[in-house]
Image: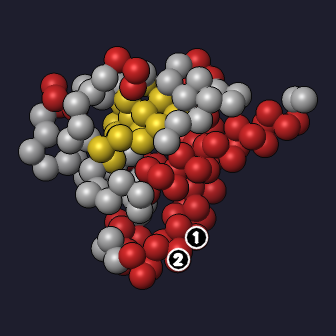
Amino acid sequence: MVMRKGTRMIQVKRVYELPAREDGFRVLVERLWPRGITKERARLDLWLKEIAPSPDLRTWFSHDLSKWDEFTRRYRAELALNGDLVEMLEQKSRETPVTLIFSARDPEHNSAVILRQVIEEKIRLHKGKHE
């Protein structure tokens, strides 16, 4: 899923997928390095582990979909405390496409999806203030 209004593009992509030119600025948003992936294969521009869910939250969630809504709420609260990192990614997305790289198996229920939503919300908010 891609967003193009008020930004070049923000997408999410699993680290095990091949990098592509259209990925733009590739940011690993995981606290732990993905298994079986070399730095060369990952082709990252940045590893932003500080923006990933806290170890306690990640352990609590354990990819249990029955906890997804609460995980989303708690991770959004953590992101609110990391506003400078979210802001940095928002600004970067104004310059070039940004791809948030994740390692979870589920492409729809992972922290990168939530992070993208938060960045897109900030972009819409800022765009609304400048119109």
The amino acid sitting under disc 1 is Arg
Tag on residue 70? 2
Residue 91 shows in the view? no
Q: Residue at x 41, y 71 (%)?
A: 57
Mark 2 vs mark 1, CA separation in Å:
5 Å
Rendered position, 31 above or below 68? above
In the rendered structure, the answer to whether residue 88 lies left or right of residue 17 reads right
Q: Is 32 or 72 nearer to us in this picture?
A: 72
Q: Are marks 2 and 1 in contact (CB under 8 Å)?
A: yes
- Provide residue 92's location: percent of width, then percent of height: 56, 26
Q: Position of residue 33 (x, y in %)?
A: 22, 47
Q: In the image, which disc is placed on residue 73?
A: 1
Element on which disc 2 rests: helix
Left or right: where 39 falls relative to 75: left
Q: State the quadrant of the C terminus.
A: top right
Question: Which residue is at the far front?
Answer: 1
- Residue plotted at (49% across, 42% down): 1
Other-residue count near label 1 (Cα within 10 Å), few / some / many at <14 / 14–19 / ≥20 = few
Extreme residue toward the bottom, this view: 66
Residue 95 in which image quadrant: top right
The picture places residue 32, in percent across and down from the top left corner, at: 25, 52
Under circle 1, the secondary element is helix
56 vs 91, nearest the viewer = 91
Res 106 seen here: yes
**Image spot of residue 127 (x, y percent):** 80, 33
Label number found at residue 85: none
Q: Residues within 10 Å of mark 2 (few under 14, many from 20)?
A: few
